[in-house]
Image (cartoon, helix red, strand yellow):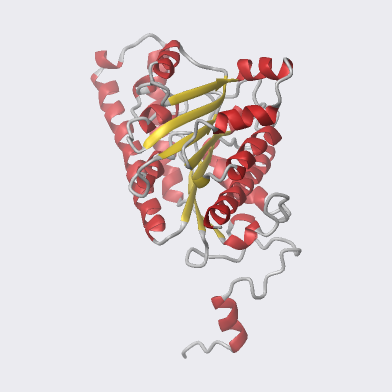
Amino acid sequence: MPVVLNFLQVQVMNNPLQAYNPNDIAEENGNFLGLPFNYESAKLIIFSVPWEVTVSYHQGTAQGPQRIADASLQIDLFDFDHPQGWQQGIFLERHTAEMLEKNEYYRSQAATIIKSLAQGLKISDSQNLKDTLVTVNHSCQQINEWLFKECQKALNLGKKVAVIGGDHSVPLGYFQALATQYDDWGILHIDAHADLRNAYEGFEFSHASIMFNAMKIPQISKLVQVGLRDICDDEIEMINQSNQRIIAYYDPVIKQQLYSGKNWLDLCREIISHLPEKVYISFDVDGLDPKLCPHTGTPVPGGLELEQVYCLFREVVNTGREIIGFDVCEVGNAEWDGNVGARIVYKLANFLDLSQIKVKN
């Protein structure tokens, strides 16, 4: 028999907020924050990418998206920067079990290469290692291509997009999709690491190479990195020879300036002054003090407080710049890490929406 919908059911389908009370307990409906939106009704689509094939230290970030989704259900929706921000419509596009299975398989393949390198072997001296490297690189390229297509589809529908990882290799396909939409944009990059290594450990799409690969995209006119404190000579040289395309704010230098009496808000405004009008935010949680996300893939002592980072993002909005997208990566496999990660995702979603409103007005 055909399903007959009553008037109220039709109204709810047309308006997902019709019967939703933001003060109630979050419903376990599979969506971020338990919000009542689907792909069609949402303005912001969050893609979950549980991929950590090239991780070089701690595993567990492939479980980050699930930890974030689970923890999001206990977050209250009122946001001091954007009280009604949740009404924009947020939908979490869940990853498949197949993606997790592929991650585990290719991670084991990558681990053989990493172990061999640590033992002093060279990839070029072993046909097995060379073949394995080709296989791993191809698997990562497939993830890039999948994410590119999914993000481009959403962007072409007029939606905004966010990505949660996974290690920091995952947003490359999204960068490439944004490059089809915008001719000139910059990345505000929060991280303990510069991620400017060329094919780290042989992996073309390593988590340590995401910004090196991003710099191959000509539409990205500026990369402003904040919180760096674990970096190699080659990366320093790339920054110094970038003709100001890459601007780095190193954590020890930031701290010394603050200890000397410099105002953080003034420093935020200086950082933002280097960015173009359209800004993408790439947030590796290891840029924070490790007490906030202790199980991240590559933790480093030092780092920023979360409210310092929010202050920086707030000033991006206050200067009239448009946030065009964001990613949150390297959240570890623990409840506390998921809690912090979920709050970061929600805050960034609200800053993105707030920036869109201000630009339109």
199 displayed left or right of 223: left
Q: 27 or 175, which is in the foreground?
A: 175
Q: 63 or 88, which is in the foreground?
A: 88
Can residue 60 be seen in the rendering of this structure?
no
**Where on the picture, by quarter, is residue 316?**
top right
**What x and y, as percent, mark residue 110?**
39, 27
**What x and y, as percent, mark residue 275?**
49, 34
Query: Relative to 231, does residue 53 appear above or below in the rendering?
Result: below
**What x and y, as percent, mark residue 242?**
38, 21
Residue drawn at 60 percent across, 37 percent down = 333
**Where on the picture, by quarter, is residue 338?**
top right
232 displayed left or right of 261: left
**What x and y, as percent, mark residue 88?**
58, 61
Quarter of the figure with the C terminus: bottom right
326 displayed left or right of 19: left
Query: Relative to 43, does residue 231 appear above or below in the rendering?
Result: above
Can residue 151 be seen in the rendering of this structure?
yes
Residue drawn at 70 percent across, 56 percent down = 83
Numbered-mark total: 0
Query: Relative to 162, does residue 158 appear above or below in the rendering?
Result: below
Residue drawn at 43 percent across, 34 percent down = 169
